[in-house]
């Protein structure tokens, strides 16, 4: 009789846990699927965010809103590139991941502020992150300018300022 009660409690616990964490698991899976990444990247970030911030983050990306998903990917980019590993190889890798997913790989000021809110338990230095964001964006913007026809090879792409000078 006791084993029946224990088995029932175990089943209720497992089913309750599945129901309570379903929305957060679906949100993380949606971001993983879009970025084509294993869940370990997002789950490690969530575990270090703290319980309250992690719930806020998963609630934020849980809807079908593409902007929220993009901002969630930007928070992950900030986490991976500005906090975990700032090496050039890692920057290139994460820039490619976000570009392949169809997201802008540049970090906006609003996305950085959003990340500072979600990562508040880690107490990141705001000024340092702003400086790193500027360096990151400048690195990839500079590469983008080279692709716009300002190299010696030329090309059919013209920067907007060059087009304005011509017209």
Image (spheres, rainbow, N blue to C red):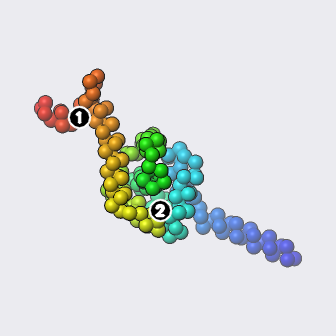
28 vs 146, left or right, is right
Above or below for 121 versus 164: below
Which of the 4 image quarters holds residue 18?
A: bottom right
Q: Within 10 angstroms of label 1, few (less than 14), some, or many (20 or more) residues?
A: some
Above or below for 30 versus 49: above
Q: Which residue is mark 2?
A: 57
Q: Within 10 angstroms of label 2, few (less than 14), some, or many (20 or more) residues?
A: many
Which of the 4 image quarters holds residue 166?
A: top left
Quadrant placement of the C terminus: top left
Quadrant placement of the N terminus: bottom right
Q: Nearer the viewer, mark 1 or mark 2?
A: 1
Q: Nearer the viewer, residue 22 or 124?
A: 124
Q: Residue at x 39, y 45 (%)?
A: 105
Q: Residue at x 31, y 32 (%)?
A: 147
Q: Secondary structure at mark 2?
A: helix
Q: Residue at x 41, y 63 (%)?
A: 124
State whether residue 73 appears in this view.
Answer: no
Q: Secondary structure at mark 1?
A: loop
State whether residue 40 appears in this view.
Answer: yes
**x and y percentages locating residue 130 in the rendered image:** 33, 57
**Marks 1 and 2, how far apart in space?**
37 Å
Above or below for 117 versus 132: below
135 vs 38, left or right, is left
**x and y percentages locating residue 20 in the rendered image:** 60, 67
Q: Could you say which disc has been placed on residue 46 in the image?
A: none
Which of the 4 image quarters holds residue 139?
A: top left
Q: Which residue is mark 1?
A: 159
Q: Single out the residue that lies furthest toward the right.
A: 1
N-term mark: 1 or 2:
2
Residues at circles 1 and 2 in contact by the CB criterion of under 8 Å: no
Q: Residue at x 52, y 67 (%)?
A: 50
Q: Nearer the viewer, residue 139 or 10?
A: 139
């Amino acid at each position: 009789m006791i084993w029946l009660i224990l088995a029932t409690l175990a089943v209720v616990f497992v089913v309750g846990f599945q129901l309570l964490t379903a929305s957060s698991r679906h949100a993380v899976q949606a971001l993983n699927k879009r970025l084509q990444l294993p869940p370990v990247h997002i789950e490690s970030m969530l575990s270090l965010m703290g319980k309250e911030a992690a719930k806020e983050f998963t609630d934020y990306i849980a809807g079908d809103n593409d902007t929220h998903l993009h901002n969630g990917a930007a928070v992950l980019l900030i986490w991976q590139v500005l906090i975990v590993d700032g090496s050039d190889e890692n920057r290139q890798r994460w820039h490619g991941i976000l570009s392949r997913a169809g997201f802008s790989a540049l970090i906006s000021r609003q996305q950085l502020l959003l990340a500072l809110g979600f990562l508040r338990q880690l107490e990141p230095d705001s000024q340092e992150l702003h400086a790193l964001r500027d360096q990151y964006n400048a690195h990839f913007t500079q590469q983008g300018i080279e692709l716009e026809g300002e190299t010696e090879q030329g090309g059919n792409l013209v920067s907007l300022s060059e087009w304005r000078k011509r017209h």
